[in-house]
Amino acid sequence: MPSAHTLLVVDDEAASRYSITRVFQSYYRIVEASSVAEARRRLQADRPEVVLLDYNMPGEDGMVLLQELAPDPDAPAVIMITAHGSERVAVEAMKAGAYDYLAKPYELDELRLVVSRALERQDLRSEVHGLREQLAGEGQFGRMVGASAAMRELFRNAERVAQSDLPVLLLGESGTGKDLLAQEIHVRSPRSKKRFVALNCAALPETLVESELFGYEKGAFTGATAARAGKFELAHGGTLFLDEIGDMDPATQAKILRAVESGAVERLGGSRPIAVDARMISATNQELQAAIRESRFREDLYFRLAGVTLYLPPLRQRREDIPLLIERFWSSQQRKYEREGPALSRDALAALEAAPWPGNVRQLHNVMERLFVMAGGEKVSADDVTAALGPGSPGAMSALEGPLSAPDLREGRRLFETEYLTRKLREYGGNVTRTAKEIGIERQSLQEKIKKLGIVRT
């Protein structure tokens, strides 16, 4: 009885289709197409795992269909069938994304082997994808962990977007893990075999950002003793991660927009465009919509970068993840320092869970390492936690201390509203209507604030 696997045989010659069908019909479900147009319909209707695709066909040839399928991470494995002596076509097919090729006339054993290997690869890819989705649902996404509803949803969405080539915009406060998420999206993408190139736009002076992004030719400026490729070039075929894009000056924003739209860059001091193909992932801790209104960020660039927007919630909005993160970070210190280390007391754990964590996951990680290295005795105490948090940071800070330490009124108000509304929603069981009534605002206004502040109802 044939297996659940489906093979699509695309060839304009009925005799060729018949001979292949006879070889595999006892093992797999076989569907046929006599043209590229018919193959497109079969692909939609039958979802084959493997396509045996003849190159030479009247009208559209097999390469046209291969090039259409190649960008799709869920596309079937394509085995291109070429005429004898068409080595150049075979090489082009492999470069375009074919799994393998066969030159006519081929041996039947060779055909069986190639198809079998292609199906094994497809099965393995499906298994890996399924395991990744399962882990994401359980609260693990590469090096990131989080079992809260907000983080599980983030991981599921990131897994989906990783399979596409859409530009991604990551929003969230400093220390929430935007750089880790960007790396993991790249690792899970079809571009994973190429480079992941990152640039922190806030860490460089404005005068250097442009040369870092686009590169320069020898003699372009004083000190340019040799030509150098920029980040766009280095990321060709892979992923370019622009961190803290909200801090980028308007002139550089315009040049990035031009590069993204044209698919080409020009080095400083150069005169020829250089084609680049990099998947864009950007991140910022700023409110870009406010920056757009204040003319600090280009709206057209925003729409280019925000193909998909993912929001990383701050740690105070997912406190149920703190014990999981503590366990992960403590284990990582044990591996790093190759020793068991002191035990964490209940009071220490309570103090860690009660802390406000304005620095989010990054701060928690640093505090855990500090505790592992500096705590004396066999157990880490609540006093050790207070010391590790730093001066003026008791383990049980009041809810107001975060807002009061904010750099400006807007951030302080945001922190206070987030904490206040989160507590009130929790108090009234996540019921928006009742919460709005009790705190004296309209239900619609509360819903807008929940969305704007990224509050997760629990």
Image (spheres, helix red, strand yellow):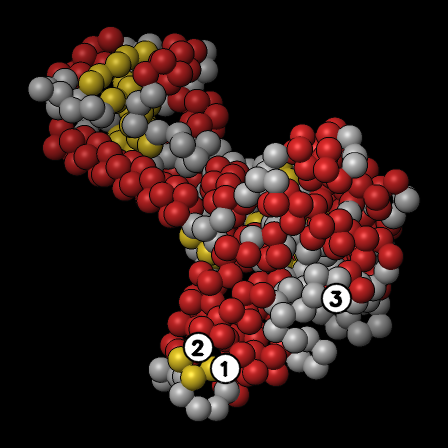
Image quadrant of residue 70? top left
What's under tag 2, amino acid-wise? Ser
Q: Position of residue 25 (x, y in %)?
A: 14, 18
Residue at x-position 33% and y-position 10%: 34
Q: Are marks 2 and 1 in contact (CB under 8 Å)?
A: yes
Q: Which residue is mark 2?
A: 345
Q: Residues within 10 Å of mark 1 (few under 14, many from 20)?
A: many
Q: Nearer the N terminus, badge 2 or badge 3? A: 2
Image quadrant of residue 61? top left
Please tell me whether residue 408 is drawn above or below residue 59 in the rendered image: below
Q: Is residue 104 visible?
A: yes
Please tell me whether residue 344 is drawn above or below residue 169 in the rendered image: below
Q: Which mark is residue 401?
A: 3
As drawn, is 195 to the left or to the right of 265? left
Please tell me whether residue 258 is drawn above or below residue 366 in the rendered image: above
Callout 2 secondary element: loop
Q: Which mark is residue 370?
A: none
The CA distance from mark 3 to mark 1 is 23 Å
Nearest to the observer: residue 297 or residue 441: 441
What's under tag 1, amino acid-wise? Ser
